[in-house]
Amino acid sequence: MNEATKEFIAILVSQVRDEAIEGGDIRWRQLEREHKGFVAKRWEKAMQAGDLDGLVRMIIADTVDTTIYHFLHAIDEGILPLVFKGTNLTEDGAGDLAGFYVDEARYALSKQRTYEEDLPHL
């Protein structure tokens, strides 16, 4: 494996995987606090209802969304430069790939569960 490939994997692990896990840990710890983000509030509601299956399904979907968000954010910030079909995603994405994914694309494009109550109310 060449050095560029190893560097890509190292960035992917630190900027995507580790950030996504940290975000999930933060949400989980928020369950013990008075002030919670909207995702932690949704998790708490499922826990209080005793809906373990629903909670696990939420955590799975939220973890995937967080991981994809961090991947796109790393591209937006130029930390993970990526060219797809000849398009430089950092430059042509105008620094908004992660925002577009979180606010719109996952709801419009995914065939799997999303949580529309998380949509920003503009």
Image (cartoon, rainbow, N blue to C red):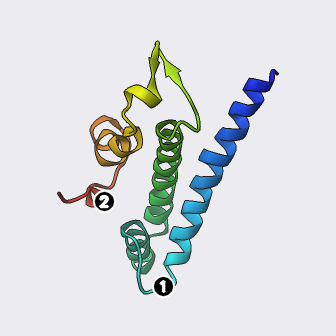
Q: Residue at the spot x=68%, y=44% of the render?
A: 13
Residue 57 higher or lower than 77, as above or below? below
Label 1 – label 2 distance at C-alpha: 20 Å
The furthest residue to the left:
122
User: Furthest residue to the bottom?
Assistant: 34
Query: What x and y, as percent, mark residue 119?
Result: 26, 56
Location of the C terminus (image quadrant): bottom left
What residue is at 37 percent from the left and 41 percent from the top?
Answer: 101
User: Is 42 on the left or on the right of 117, as rendered?
Assistant: right
Viewer-side residue, 89 vs 25 = 89
Q: Circle 2 is placed at which residue position?
A: 118
Q: Quadrant of residue 112?
A: top left
Under tag 1, what secondary structure?
loop
Image coordinates for residue 73, horizontal then vertical, percent: 48, 43
- Determine the residue positioned at 43% across, 87% down: 34
- Looking at the rendered structure, the secondary structure element under dot 2 is helix
Residue 67: image location, x then y, percent: 53, 47
Q: Name which residue type carries label 2.
A: Asp
Do the numbered discs 1 and 2 sit on residues whose CB atoms are within 8 Å?
Answer: no
The residue at which mark 1 appears reads as 33
Q: Amino acid at mark 1?
A: Arg
- The earlier-in-sequence mark between 1 and 2 is 1
